[in-house]
Amino acid sequence: MENHQEKSQEEMVKEAVNEAKRTAKCAEENETDSAEDAKGSKNQAEKAVDADQPEDAKEAEDADQSEETDSTEEADGKEQDADRKSGKKLFGKKDKKDKKDEKIEELTDKLTRQMAEFDNFRKRTDKEKAQMYEVGAKDIIEKILPVVDNFERGLDAVKEEDKEDPFVQGMEKVYKQLMTTLEGIEVKPIEAVGQEFDPNLHNAVMHVEDENIGENIITEEFQKGYTYRDTVVRHSMVKVAN
């Protein structure tokens, strides 16, 4: 009787243990199923959100990603260019000039200076030649003018009845040719009689009081004056009224 009761108790204990194991196993399986169900629900929710999202939004998002990529690439390109430029500055310096090039530059500079000096010398020489020519021409003209004066005095002394004489006519022709030659080299007589006295052109050697003549008017010329290219070679000797 006691053995039967002990076995019954043992069986009851075993059954209780087995029941506890089954309960624990069921609880574990339920927990695993719940986790899988939650994960599947999350995936389904994400798919639903992607399906409901507008195509424009997707395109905008893709465009933003593409623009971000392009900006990154452009920044990388600029950085590479900067590196190349800095590399050129650091390592691309021009080598020192060759001695031949330095000699060529030195000779070229020397030749340029000499050409400039020669040009200045030529201009200065031309100016000096012109001045010498002016001085020489004026000196010759001054020496010729007394000859002209003598021709004029001689022709003025010829009587009216002797003007048809061949000798007198020959002298007149020589005088005219001489005056034409002087005019050809820009030697011109200064106007005097009837003109107002000008100290730059005339030399007053006599004054006369005459109420019928205006003030500072030349009434008589004693010796002709001449100019050469607007320069006075000889002043006119004149008489001035009042």
Image: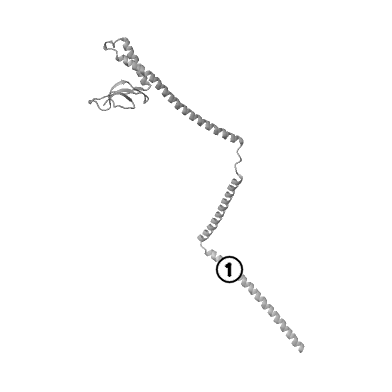
In the rendering, at what x and y percent does residue 41 appear?
58, 69
Q: Quadrant of the N terminus?
A: bottom right
Q: Residue furthest bottom?
A: 1
Who's the residue at 60% across and 68% down the image?
Answer: 40
Who's the residue at 73% across and 83% down the image?
Answer: 11
Q: Quadrant of the C terminus?
A: top left
Choose top left, top right, bottom left or bottom right for residue 201. top left
**Residue type (three-letter) at the residue carrying disc 1:** Lys
Choose top left, top right, bottom left or bottom right for residue 108. top right
Vertical placement of 66 versus 18: above or below? above
Q: Which residue is mark 1?
A: 42
Query: Taking 33 as reference, is 64 left or right?
Result: left
In the rendering, at what x and y percent does residue 100 appear?
60, 34
Q: Residue furthest left?
A: 212
Categorize mark 1 by other alpha carbons within 10 Å: few (<14), some (14-19), many (20+). few
Is the image coloured rainbow, by chain, by secondary structure, or in one colour? one colour
In the rendering, at what x and y percent does residue 101 appear?
59, 35
Vertical placement of 30 versus 229: above or below? below
Vertical placement of 124 versus 25: above or below? above
Who's the residue at 56% across and 67% down the image?
Answer: 45
Give the number of marks: 1
Vertical placement of 173 versus 68: above or below? above
In the rendering, at what x and y percent does residue 136 appear?
42, 22
Query: Taking 113 as reference, is 195 left or right?
Result: left
The secondary structure type at the circle numbered 1 is helix
